[in-house]
């Protein structure tokens, strides 16, 4: 099977980080490609950034289907353009946020999300509510680091995750922690050992979800929510 992972921002170092972490985890029969758009925001840390990242990301998804890919993974923990992508494509499109939230809800009584900045906390709470998982949310804890800082300073990022996740466990009752940024790929095992809880790295979860859907020949229903948009002219 062929799977395309898209980092919706334009930072090549983050894309390479994702590629390096995901390649050893792919199935033996999976041909994996990890890319980012040529144009758009260098990081995604607001609704505005998400909106600006969506058009070039959708173009990559359209091209992926033409190129014979079997599934696409959106590797940003806000799933920018996920619904539009599923309307556009007939192959599965998997978001790392949606996948991680549902898997986390299966692994413990309550989960906490680690996010970059304090300003993103309300948005993450809204995303959890949109998925119908409010009763499973213990907290959203900010790391108070930008996405680019997390990419450039991995040791500092790990220290902040340990502090924030530890507080989530002690004070919020979290039994599962989600690393809420694709740029934190590869940190889960170390954090899990330190804290003794389940820690989810969303990008590998979404990759395995994409492989599962392809292997079972499952696709998004086009009956209603993800129906193909009617053809029209754009001016």
Image (cartoon, rainbow, N blue to C red):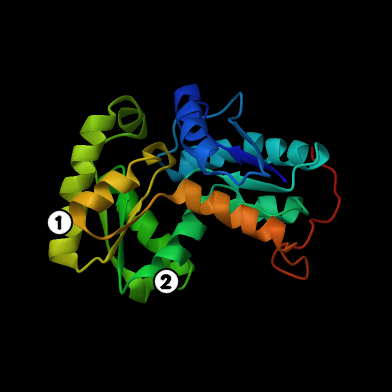
Q: Residue at x 50, y 23 (%)?
A: 12
Q: How many marks?
A: 2
Percent from the top left, x then y, of residue 107?
A: 38, 69
Percent from the top left, x then y, of residue 148?
A: 36, 29
Q: Residues within 10 Å of mark 1 (few under 14, many from 20)?
A: some
Q: Residue at x 38, y 56 (%)?
A: 124
Q: Quadrant of residue 125?
A: bottom left
Is residue 42 visible in the rendered image? The answer is no
Q: What residue is pinned by disc 2?
A: 106
Q: Residues within 10 Å of mark 2 (few under 14, many from 20)?
A: few
Residue in the foreground of this view, choosing between 223 and 119: 223
In which quadrant of the rendered image does the C terminus lie? top right
Q: Quadrant of residue 33?
A: top right
Percent from the top left, x then y, of residue 63?
A: 76, 36
Q: Is residue 83 left or right of residue 156?
A: right
Q: Residue at x 85, y 48 (%)?
A: 232
Q: Is residue 216 left or right of residue 182?
A: right
Is 93 located above or below residue 235 in the figure?
below
Is 24 located above or below residue 216 in the figure?
above
Which is nearer the N-term, disc 1 or disc 2? 2
Q: Is residue 10 left or right of residue 233?
A: left
Q: What residue is pinned by disc 1?
A: 167
Per the image, label 2 sits on a secondary structure element best described as helix
Percent from the top left, x then y, of residue 198?
A: 31, 60
Residue in the foreground of this view, choosing between 195 and 146: 195
Q: Residue at x 38, y 40 (%)?
A: 186
Mark in the foreground, 1 or 2 = 2
């Amino acid at each position: 099977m062929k799977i395309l992972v898209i980092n919706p921002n334009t930072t090549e170092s983050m894309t390479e980080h994702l590629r390096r972490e995901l390649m050893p985890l792919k199935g033996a029969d999976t041909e994996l490609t990890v890319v980012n758009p040529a144009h758009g925001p260098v990081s995604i840390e607001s609704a505005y950034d998400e909106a600006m990242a969506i058009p070039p990301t959708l173009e990559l998804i359209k091209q992926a289907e033409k190129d014979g890919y079997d599934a696409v993974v959106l590797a940003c923990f806000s799933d920018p353009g996920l619904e539009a992508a599923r309307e556009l494509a007939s192959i599965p499109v998997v978001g790392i946020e949606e996948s991680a939230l549902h898997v986390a809800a299966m692994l413990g009584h309550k989960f906490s999300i680690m996010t970059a900045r304090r300003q993103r906390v309300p948005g993450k709470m809204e995303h959890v509510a949109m998925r119908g998982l409010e009763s499973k949310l213990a907290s959203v804890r900010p790391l108070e680091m930008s996405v680019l800082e997390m990419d450039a300073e991995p040791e500092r990022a790990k220290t902040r995750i340990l502090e924030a996740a530890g507080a989530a466990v002690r004070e919020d009752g979290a039994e599962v922690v989600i690393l809420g940024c694709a740029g934190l790929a590869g940190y889960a095992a170390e954090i899990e050992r330190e804290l003794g809880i389940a820690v989810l790295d969303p990008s590998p979860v979404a990759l395995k979800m994409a492989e599962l859907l392809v292997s079972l020949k499952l696709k998004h229903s086009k009956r209603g929510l993800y129906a193909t948009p009617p053809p029209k002219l754009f001016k």
